[in-house]
């Protein structure tokens, strides 16, 4: 008898029970979040109708969602997976702009700004020393050490049967091609390209630098899920290499190697789900590669953190979510954390991603409480006020922790312009006065305003110390009045922003011709003394017409000059930018001030 016939002969209650048995259970829908942002062009202009797509690292060529910018260059992408999501945008003749948002159950929304830069298409052919085409060679086109105000993704591809390649989106100016194929040594070919160019590359056979890894203590099935991240540095500064070489995996014997590398410092970081590795990562010395890098794996859960969480009055705190971070990944969103929730007695047991004696920190998320710990001079929290809400320690098996929490103080803000309109997507800081310190104010937390100009900072310690909200960016600059928040209290503040200014100009050679692809930096200076007021820098490239633009410049003193390492310096005098004003200047190479 078919099911529909059997159902007809049953009572309503029996029918419901039978359906409950035969129909699949409804799974809890996965957590999702929303990303908002905008796309700007080389001169800070809004890019209208530009496609913005989302992807999950490392599969950045697979689109999980997409949309287009509106008439103000803004976009919204909803129903994104609750994790770190990469956002990308481009148009022909420009770089592929890239940024990321961090989404979670506790942080379902995040914002990002993308910026495009002038770019070329580099075409060419890869051959060996005999002139034979090299098929399947990996070719990357990039520009090193840029630090631009807007990240870009370097184009990469493999050569065809004739050894040919075509890379669109390589930033104009001094750039480099990195080419590698199995059995060959990576070739790094530098050039200055201001227009599309044809480039031929020759590869020589050999081993070059060899990085070898062995991980002990892993079961066979864990090796298949491993990931080995490799990235190079020179003099401590990272540079791009073919992405195919940046990610590897262990074989069945727990080993992995990469050959044909150029001379550099190689940073190697293996990860295996469910395991913690000691050491976490290794950085080699240039020219002194060890024969093999050995890592020892331990299952997560081999070391547990256990203890009790209570208020300052001794009351157990139940249902509180604790997050553990290793010392090497102290970001609130980065890395793979350990998690635990306190029970009715305030007790918790956590399978921690730690090895014995490893430094770590604990903090509460989604809570109306924050941890309190007396900080010693050797703790990070003694000098960084952001760590006041964290418990810092070293992993010691078997020791019971006694964590104290106090009621959190919460600060919310709204950013508006001089007309009272909301200012979206603006980086904002919550700061605390620090008597006797230099500077006088220290950061407590960060947030970025939503489309409606509102933002909320994570809970902090309340008390008598003065607080303020500081915003600065393309939407304007402003500082709130100084205020205090009692423990467990809430404070709402509206920050009225002065309109941000712009600094635009050209870089010219001695003959007055425009200089393309030149790095220009903007620093903050005191107009009266001529001294730099902080260590912050903002760097942009000039276009083919030699023009550059800094947008979202805070009112005050500034100076434009070349970054360290530029071969032809040109500095401006210190100048002042008024609220909403545009300062225009030309820099002539050789006219260093």
Image (tube, grey):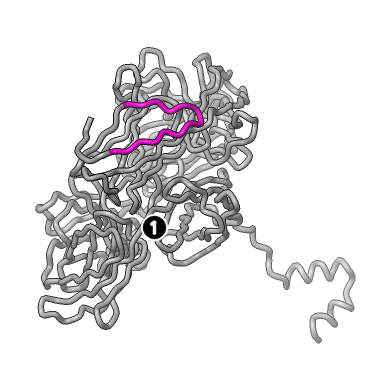
Question: Is 140 on the left or on the right of 210, as rendered?
Answer: right
Task: Please tell me which residue lies in front, 14 or 207.
Answer: 207
Quadrant housing the N terminus:
bottom right
Residue 502, given in percent of the width and then of the height, sits at 44, 36
Quadrant housing the C terminus:
top left
Task: Please tell me which residue lies in front, 392 or 87.
Answer: 87
Identify whether 409 is placed above or below 515.
above
Number of marks in picture: 1
Q: Residues within 10 Å of mark 1 (few under 14, many from 20)?
A: many
Question: Is 332 on the left or on the right of 126, as rendered?
Answer: right
Q: Mark 1 points at which residue?
A: 95
Task: Please tell me which residue lies in front, 108 or 136.
Answer: 136
Q: What element carries label 1?
A: loop
Please give the name of the residue rendered at 40% of the width and 47% of the height, measured from the top-left corner.
150
Q: Can residue 256 be seen in this view?
A: yes
Please give the name of the residue rendered at 53% of the width and 31% of the height, measured from the top-left corner.
499
Identify whether 496 is placed above or below 249.
above
Does the magenta run of residues contain 586?
A: yes
**Principal SS element in the magenta part?**
strand
Please give the name of the residue rendered at 56% of the width and 20% of the height, measured from the top-left corner.
313
Identify whether 228 is placed above or below 307.
below
* Region rendered in magenta: 574-587
Task: Please tell me which residue lies in front, 323 or 56.
Answer: 56
Residue 481: quarter of image: top right
Residue 271, given in percent of the width and then of the height, sits at 34, 56
Residue 309, given in percent of the width and then of the height, sits at 52, 31
Residue 417: quarter of image: top right
Q: Is residue 338 visible?
A: no
């Amino acid at each position: 008898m078919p099911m529909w016939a059997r159902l007809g002969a049953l009572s309503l209650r029996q029918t419901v029970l039978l359906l409950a048995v035969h129909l699949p259970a409804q799974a809890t829908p996965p957590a999702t979040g929303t990303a908002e942002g905008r796309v700007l062009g080389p001169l800070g202009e809004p890019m209208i109708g530009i496609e913005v797509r989302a992807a999950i690292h490392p599969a950045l060529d697979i689109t999980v969602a997409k949309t287009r910018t509106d008439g103000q260059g803004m976009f919204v992408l909803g129903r994104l997976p609750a994790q770190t999501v990469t956002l990308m945008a481009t148009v022909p003749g420009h770089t592929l702009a890239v940024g990321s948002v961090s989404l979670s159950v506790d942080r379902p929304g995040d914002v990002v700004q993308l910026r495009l830069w002038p770019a070329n298409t580099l075409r060419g052919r890869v051959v060996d020393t005999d002139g034979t085409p090299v098929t399947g060679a990996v070719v990357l086109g990039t520009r090193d050490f840029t630090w631009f105000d807007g990240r870009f993704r370097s184009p990469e591809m493999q050569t065809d049967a004739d050894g040919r390649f075509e890379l669109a989106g390589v930033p104009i100016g001094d750039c480099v091609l990195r080419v590698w194929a199995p059995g060959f040594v990576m070739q790094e070919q530098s050039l200055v390209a201001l227009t599309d160019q044809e480039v031929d590359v020759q590869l020589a056979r050999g081993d070059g630098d060899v990085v070898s890894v062995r991980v002990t203590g892993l079961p066979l099935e864990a090796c298949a899920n491993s990931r080995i991240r490799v990235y190079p540095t020179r003099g401590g500064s990272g540079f791009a290499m073919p992405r195919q070489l940046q990610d590897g995996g262990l074989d069945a014997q727990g080993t992995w190697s990469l050959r044909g590398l150029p001379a550099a410092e190689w940073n190697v970081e293996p990860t295996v789900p469910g395991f913690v590795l000691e050491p976490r990562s290794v950085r080699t010395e240039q020219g002194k590669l060890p024969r093999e890098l050995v890592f020892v794996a331990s299952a997560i859960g081999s070391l547990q953190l256990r203890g009790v969480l209570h208020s300052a009055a001794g009351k157990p705190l139940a249902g509180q979510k604790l997050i553990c971070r290793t010392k090497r990944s102290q970001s609130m969103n980065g890395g793979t954390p350990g998690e635990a929730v306190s029970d009715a007695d305030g007790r918790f047991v956590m399978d921690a991603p730690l090895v014995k004696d490893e430094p770590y920190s604990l903090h509460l998320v989604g809570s109306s409480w924050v941890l309190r710990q007396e900080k010693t001079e050797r703790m990070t929290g003694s000098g960084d006020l952001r760590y006041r809400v964290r418990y810092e320690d070293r992993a010691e098996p078997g020791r019971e922790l006694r964590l104290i929490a106090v009621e959190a103080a919460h600060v919310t803000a709204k950013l508006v312009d001089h007309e009272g309109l909301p200012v979206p997507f603006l980086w904002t800081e919550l700061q605390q006065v620090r008597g006797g310190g230099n500077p006088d104010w220290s950061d407590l937390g960060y947030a970025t305003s939503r489309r409606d100009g509102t933002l909320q900072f994570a809970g902090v310690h309340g008390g008598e110390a003065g607080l303020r909200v500081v915003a600065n960016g393309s939407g304007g600059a402003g500082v709130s009045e100084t205020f205090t928040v009692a423990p467990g209290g809430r404070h709402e503040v509206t920050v009225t922003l002065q309109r941000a200014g712009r600094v635009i100009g050209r870089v010219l050679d001695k003959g007055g011709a425009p200089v393309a692809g030149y790095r220009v930096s903007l620093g903050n200076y005191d107009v009266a003394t001529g001294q730099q007021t902080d260590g912050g820098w903002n760097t942009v490239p000039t276009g083919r017409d030699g023009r550059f633009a800094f947008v979202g410049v805070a009112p005050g003193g500034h100076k434009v000059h070349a970054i360290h390492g530029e071969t032809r310096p040109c500095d401006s005098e210190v100048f002042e930018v008024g609220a909403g004003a545009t300062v225009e200047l030309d820099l002539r190479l050789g006219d260093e001030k």
